[in-house]
Image (cartoon, rainbow, N blue to C red):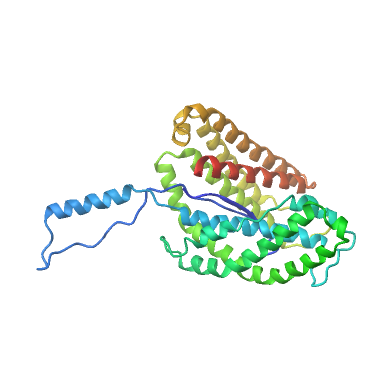
Amino acid sequence: MKRITKTTFPRLLGAWVLILALLLSGCSFGKSSTDTDTDGASVSDDAGTDSAAEEQEDADQPVDYSKFNAYLEVLDNVYEMDELLTNYFTVVQYQPEFALVDGAEYSMLDDVFGFYTFNSYIMEDAMGYCDEDPDYPEQDELLKQLEQPYQTMGEVLGELGWYISYQEYDEDNFSEAAALHTRLYEAVEAFDEVALPFIESMNVLDEATEAEELERLQAEGWDIAYYSRILVSVSNDIDTEIWEQLSAVEIGTTLPPLDMTNLETLYTEHQEAYTSLTEALADPACVEVVWPDSVTADAEVELFTTAANNVNSALESFMTAARNQTDYSESYDAYFTACSKLIDLYNSMISG
């Protein structure tokens, strides 16, 4: 099944992006040509029947989204790297020489890096699919271009994470901090150059499969997965609307008021999806499709329902603050965090 990826790319995109992962699909590619014998005559009815049976058997086989999901894992880590870079260059000046931003302290990075570790296997696993079916010509090529800058960036961030997490800068008077900064600065340009095209290409690929996936989920009775995807999709639309407004104005020390016209419409859509999702989570038949194991189903439903409720509550808080033109930054952060948690649960409990 296709996973959901949650991401943030403020240096390149200025917004957080949600990409939905597909469940295993029953769709397949059947034969369309008519077979003939060597004399040009049609094959026998038995052969035609066999061919039809083979096509039906192929159609019953679920689509393997392992390759797509492996690429999404890379994408998710690209966003994580960028978030670390964004925070790093808020504290350290973006220049070849190591120097702190005025008023900043290096210790401000302690919580940001939080014992970050780099897993090189994620890229290695994705690269193993490059020449496998299904064929994603554009994404395959971009992944190959991304491989080395990604690995280089990950290695430097991993070392930096270790160095910061254990506060070794207190002992060496920032000598290693300067050396790591040089390597990081040198790696950023190559990373940025290939990361954005890969992101944009993956977004296009995701959009190309989404309508088909939603149709399948609804037809096969996966209501919990269906409405989860709708909820996340509307969340992404809300976020896009917010960032489009913020990018059109100059932001000072406080966030500007938002035009609520489109946000109110999206909020109504969000509420409809949330209501449908909670109803599906309360329906034993819908639960049975996702969690057939009755021993663990109740606990999983409770956990997922709580996550959906938290998304709804956080969005309500954001809408209240935005409507009243008060500071909505904290409620927005809470909404983003709640959405991220829901996506994590979807990936682990539904998409597997």
**Is residue 235 shown left or right of residue 98?**
left
Q: Position of residue 5 (x, y in %)?
A: 58, 52
Compare residues 301 and 161 and report the one nearer the observer: 161
Query: In the displayed structure, does residue 132 sit left or right of residue 96?
Result: left
The residue at the point 64 percent across, 39 percent down is 312
Residue 324 shows in this picture: yes
| Image-quadrant location for residue 124 | bottom right
On screen, residue 334 versus residue 108, left or right, reads left
The residue sitting at 47% across, 36% down in the picture is 290
Taking the spot 17% from the left edge, 51% from the top edge, the residue there is 49
Q: Is residue 339 above or below residue 148?
A: above
Q: Nearer the viewer, residue 277 or 179?
A: 179
Q: Is residue 351 above or below residue 126?
A: above
Task: Specify whether residue 15 is in view.
Answer: no
| 201 shown above or below 254 | below
- Residue 227 x %, y %: 52, 41
Residue drawn at x 86%, y 63% is 100
Which residue is farthest front? 171
Q: Residue 170, image x and y in percent?
A: 87, 55
Closer to the camera in the image, 138 or 237: 138
The image shows residue 111, relative to residue 274, as above or below, that is below
x, y percent for residue 18:
59, 52
